[in-house]
């Protein structure tokens, strides 16, 4: 095969993988919150964005990259917890449209407040790793130290979340709270606290995603809208993979990322979201509950 | 019933007609403004006559609604003659937006479906209007509007078909994806849609001669054409509201509300869920397209950046604040939209904020988003809903 | 010991329990009988804090449970096996048991061994998903899950529902044995009054929310007039 084409394909796969893991993480957060609280968090991109601004706003005080990251994570925990307690608590059991509207409103408010405090001009974040692509046989490879950092961090996060759920006591309780909240309460599980924890966890995953997305160097930068596109694709991935399945979300995210990269390269930039939309519609038509879920029971 | 009407009310009707004719003749001989005035008064009296006949009201609800609509239009158009150009412009914008809001109110309230993509459907109508006008400049405005509506309905059908199988969050997400993708769809057809800068209407819409005649000589064409456009927008809105009011009480409307409240029961009764849902979706997108087409008319241009996801969110906020599932909610939302820029600049000036500063430019988002959250948490039925509940409580306290 | 005093519970306009009073003594089985809709399940749910009563008190050792949250009531040592068993189908047998052991400060290994000894079937199927168990096995799992936390009070809501007579009688023997070996207070809600009365020490009969009998099990069983209430023959 034409070596130029091969390197192009490899490049697309790598580039797509890099984006794909970010979609996968957003999708994972969405599934986490959906499974535990039955709410689709439309602010899943905006909340971490805000926390990231809080953390990296400290750069002006000459804090380093890693201390700022720590602050971002803490801010994410606080924001996630406060949002669940104050905003979301009143929404459980209400008609489906209520939480959707509230979270969309929250998204708008967060982006507007971030823009008014920190302005909309993109801020570049200091990068702990170089974003210069490596070359293979003279052609750039869409792989740089930074993308390796990005992909490996994402993998670590996903594995950590999976391990938490599967192997720890906390994970067992979180799963139980989502599957059978009333029975869990009868067994002494503090369901309310766990729900708050679920939101905090999902927000932190989002914060890590935002830091990776915004920190990439050349074409990235922190803006209030930085997570908008990622959220859209993350949502599409979650919907295709099935809102009930964490594994499905991650796989769908990665696949979508790769597909997008190919469409962008071989068709044109406009076609990317259009094709993603078509894929979403097709997937939902085939299986309204997503491709990876077992037949969903009617929540009667 | 018609018989009792003719027998007992004829004397009153005749008397009213005589009074109306007298007023018309007197004022027609005075000034040109007087002609407008007398026409308005005649129509108003006729409508009031129809509305006050209780028997008439119950046996011909459609005609009563028509009379009410005519009365409303009459008053509104009359007022536009005395408003400034910029006020008329805002009113026109508000009227166009209220049509869009009406569609979304219907979709959400009557059939329980969510759409985050009505800004994109507006865009469909807007660009159809612009593209058609650029290629067929001689088509009458009404026809072009109808074409825009049909196109909106077709796109609604396209998206409505998959939508029937989706529950709330999936539907919301799909419409969100559409809203986000819309600008890129426009970009894909940039030869037709004029790329980033959009399209302009080939010729400015100007008021017809006879309308000019109603004003004093020397009135600027801008005033008259703005007036003309505003009146078109108001009339179209009136027609749209009239249809919606009838749709709501019709069999289809009732079927939709049954589905919204209890889809299992609806299925048992034999209502076809998918078909009714698709119809609701088509209606909502058709209305949005109509509003968008009017937007193009009013602004004389259609640009892609207007029809973004942010617009869809604004539309959602407005109808939530106004009152989902209500007709008056759409009117309230339209009014808010019409005057929001004024209100925001007023707030900016009152609080002494730097109008060029970060905070002021984001005030729109902060206010709308904040209102959306607060309304949904504390008054999910919006202003119209809150008023309705208050009214009910007052009624229950007073006996009879 | 659980003391119910003048408990009134309503759902909107409907009164599910009206001034119900009785005492469930420590180490004894108190049967709560009555037809469908008599308020039996509501009683247990109210004790566990899933429903707030309109008035009245529920005392366990001087503590009024009425204002407490369900999780806290459970942590006091009140085990509740709900109607329908509440077994989490997506979990394995062992995961269900682990969940039950979580809040109590018990040694997990020991607890598991105890329950597997008590219910060998569960030990055999420990890695299987609970959804695959039969009705009787699920009932055992639900009970083991409640017992692993070493509760002082056990609330059982219609444990014999949907079970074959042989299984039911085995179940009743198990409950009786448990009660005799520890100081467990058992409140047993049952529609299968005969088998419940056989093992109970005390019985309460509910009829449309009111307690029409509150006596020893022997007396209640002997009283012909009461039979109509718990056999559902009266409107």
Image (cartoon, coloured by chain):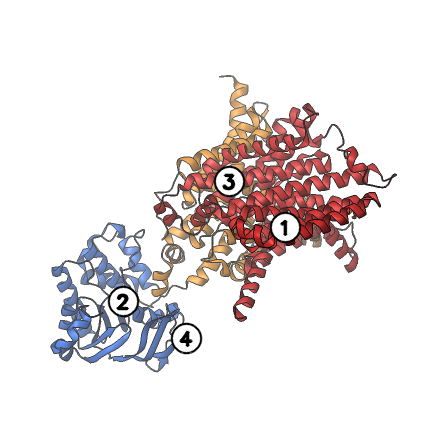
Residue A132 visible at all: no
Q: CA distance from mark 3 to mark 4?
A: 48 Å
Which residue is denoted by mark 1 in the rendering?
A: B331
Q: Is residue B38 above or below residue B129?
A: below
Q: For the residues labelled 3 and 4, say whether their Cβ atoms are less than 8 Å apart.
A: no
Tell me which chain the residue with mark 1 is part of.
B
SS under mark 3:
helix
Position of B312 with respect to A30 (left or right) is: right
Q: Nearer the viewer, mark 2 or mark 4?
A: 2
Q: CA distance from mark 2 to mark 3?
A: 44 Å
Tell me which chain the residue with mark 2 is part of.
C
Which residue is denoted by mark 4 in the rendering?
A: C67
- Image quarter where the C terminus of chain C lies is bottom left
SS under mark 1:
helix
Q: CA distance from mark 2 to mark 4?
A: 25 Å
Q: CA distance from mark 1 to mark 4?
A: 47 Å
Between disc 2 and disc 4, whose residue precedes? 2
Q: Nearer the viewer, mark 3 or mark 4?
A: 3
Between disc 3 and disc 1, whose residue precedes? 3
SS under mark 4:
loop
Which residue is denoted by mark 3 in the rendering?
A: B281
Q: CA distance from mark 2 to mark 1?
A: 49 Å
Which residue is denoted by mark 2 in the rendering?
A: C37
């Amino acid at each position: 095969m034409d070596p130029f084409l091969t390197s192009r394909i490899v490049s697309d796969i790598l580039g797509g993988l890099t984006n794909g893991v970010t979609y996968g993480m957003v999708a994972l957060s969405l599934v986490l919150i959906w499974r535990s609280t039955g709410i689709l968090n439309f602010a899943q991109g905006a909340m971490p964005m805000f926390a990231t601004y809080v953390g990296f706003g400290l750069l002006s005080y000459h804090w380093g990259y890693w201390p700022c990251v720590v602050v971002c994570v803490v801010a994410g925990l606080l924001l996630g917890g406060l949002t669940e307690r104050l905003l979301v608590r009143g929404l459980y059991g209400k008609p489906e449209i209520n939480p959707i509207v509230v979270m969309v409103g929250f998204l708008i408010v967060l982006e507007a407040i971030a823009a008014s405090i920190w302005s909309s001009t993109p801020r570049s974040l200091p990068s702990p790793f170089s974003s210069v692509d490596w070359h293979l046989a003279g052609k750039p490879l869409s792989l740089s130290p930074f993308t390796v950092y990005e992909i490996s961090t994402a993998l670590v996060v996903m594995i950590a979340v999976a391990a938490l759920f599967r192997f720890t006591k906390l994970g067992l309780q979180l799963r139980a709270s989502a599957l059978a909240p009333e029975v869990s309460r009868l067994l002494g599980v503090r369901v309310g606290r766990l729900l708050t924890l679920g939101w905090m966890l999902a927000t932190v995953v989002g914060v890590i995603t935002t830091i990776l997305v915004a920190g990439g160097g050349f074409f990235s930068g922190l803006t209030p809208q930085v997570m908008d596109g990622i959220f859209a694709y993350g949502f599409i991935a979650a919907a295709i993979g099935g809102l009930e399945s964490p594994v499905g979300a991650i796989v769908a995210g990665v696949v979508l990322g790769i597909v997008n990269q190919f469409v962008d390269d071989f068709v044109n930039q406009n076609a990317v979201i259009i094709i993603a939309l078509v894929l979403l519609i097709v997937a939902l038509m085939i299986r309204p509950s997503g491709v990876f879920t077992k037949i969903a029971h009617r929540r009667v | 019933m018609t018989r009792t009407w003719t027998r007992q009310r004829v004397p009153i009707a005749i008397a009213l007609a005589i009074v109306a004719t007298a007023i018309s003749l007197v004022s027609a001989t005075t000034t040109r403004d007087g002609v407008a005035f007398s026409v308005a008064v005649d129509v108003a009296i006729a409508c009031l006559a129809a509305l006050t006949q209780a028997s008439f009201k119950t046996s011909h609800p459609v005609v009563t609604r028509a009379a009410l609509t005519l009365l409303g239009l009459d008053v509104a158009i009359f007022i536009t003659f005395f408003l400034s150009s910029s006020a008329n412009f805002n009113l026109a914008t508000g009227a166009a937006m209220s049509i869009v809001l009406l569609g979304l109110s219907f979709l959400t309230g009557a059939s329980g479906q969510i759409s985050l993509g009505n800004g994109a459907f507006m865009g469909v109508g807007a660009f159809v209007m612009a593209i058609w006008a650029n290629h067929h400049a001689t088509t009458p405005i009404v026809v072009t509007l109808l074409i825009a509506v049909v196109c909106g309905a077709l796109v609604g059908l396209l998206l409505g078909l998959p939508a029937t199988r989706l529950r709330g969050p999936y539907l919301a997400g799909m419409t969100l994806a559409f809203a986000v993708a819309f600008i890129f769809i426009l970009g894909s057809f940039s030869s037709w849609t004029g790329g980033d800068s959009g399209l302009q209407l080939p010729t400015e819409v100007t008021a017809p001669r006879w309308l000019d005649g109603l004003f004093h000589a020397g009135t600027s064409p801008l005033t008259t054409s703005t007036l003309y456009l505003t009146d078109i927008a108001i009339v179209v809105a009136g027609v749209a509201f009239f249809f919606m009011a009838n749709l709501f009480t019709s069999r289809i409307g009732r079927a939709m509300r049954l589905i919204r409240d209890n889809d299992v029961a609806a299925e048992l009764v034999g209502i076809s869920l998918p078909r009714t849902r698709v119809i609701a979706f088509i209606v909502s997108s058709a209305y949005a397209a109509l509003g968008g087409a009017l937007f193009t008319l009013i602004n004389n241009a259609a640009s892609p950046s207007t029809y973004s996801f942010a617009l869809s969110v604004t539309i959602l906020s407005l109808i939530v604040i106004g009152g989902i599932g209500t007709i008056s909610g759409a009117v309230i939302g339209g009014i808010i939209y019409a005057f929001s820029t004024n209100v925001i600049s007023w707030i900016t000036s009152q609080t002494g904020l730097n109008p060029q500063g970060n905070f002021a430019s984001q005030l729109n988002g902060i206010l709308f988003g904040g209102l959306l959250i607060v309304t949904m948490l504390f008054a999910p039925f919006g202003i119209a809903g809150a008023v309705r509940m208050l009214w009910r409580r007052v009624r229950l306290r007073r006996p009879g | 010991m659980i003391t119910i005093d003048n408990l009134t519970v309503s759902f909107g306009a409907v009164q599910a329990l009206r001034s119900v009073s009785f005492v469930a003594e420590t180490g004894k089985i108190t049967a709560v009988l009555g037809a469908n809709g008599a308020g039996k399940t509501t009683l247990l749910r109210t004790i566990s804090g899933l429903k707030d009563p309109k008035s009245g008190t529920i005392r366990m050792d001087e503590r009024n449970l009425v204002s407490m949250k369900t999780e806290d009531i459970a942590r006091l040592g009140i085990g509740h096996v709900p109607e329908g068993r509440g077994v989490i189908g997506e979990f394995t047998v062992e995961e269900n048991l682990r969940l039950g052991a979580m809040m109590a400060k018990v040694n997990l290994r020991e607890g598991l061994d105890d329950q597997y000894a008590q219910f060998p079937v569960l030990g055999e199927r420990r890695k299987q998903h609970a959804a695959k168990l039969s009705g009787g096995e699920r009932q055992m799992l639900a009970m083991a899950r409640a017992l692993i936390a070493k509760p002082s009070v056990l609330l059982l809501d219609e444990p014999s529902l949907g079970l074959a007579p042989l299984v039911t009688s085995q179940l009743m023997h198990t409950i009786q044995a448990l009660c005799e070996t520890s100081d467990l207070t058992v409140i047993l809600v049952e529609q299968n009054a005969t088998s419940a009365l056989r093992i109970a020490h005390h019985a309460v009969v509910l009829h449309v929310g009111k307690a029409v009998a509150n006596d020893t099990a022997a007396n209640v069983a002997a009283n012909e007039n009461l039979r109509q209430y718990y056999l559902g023959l009266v409107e």
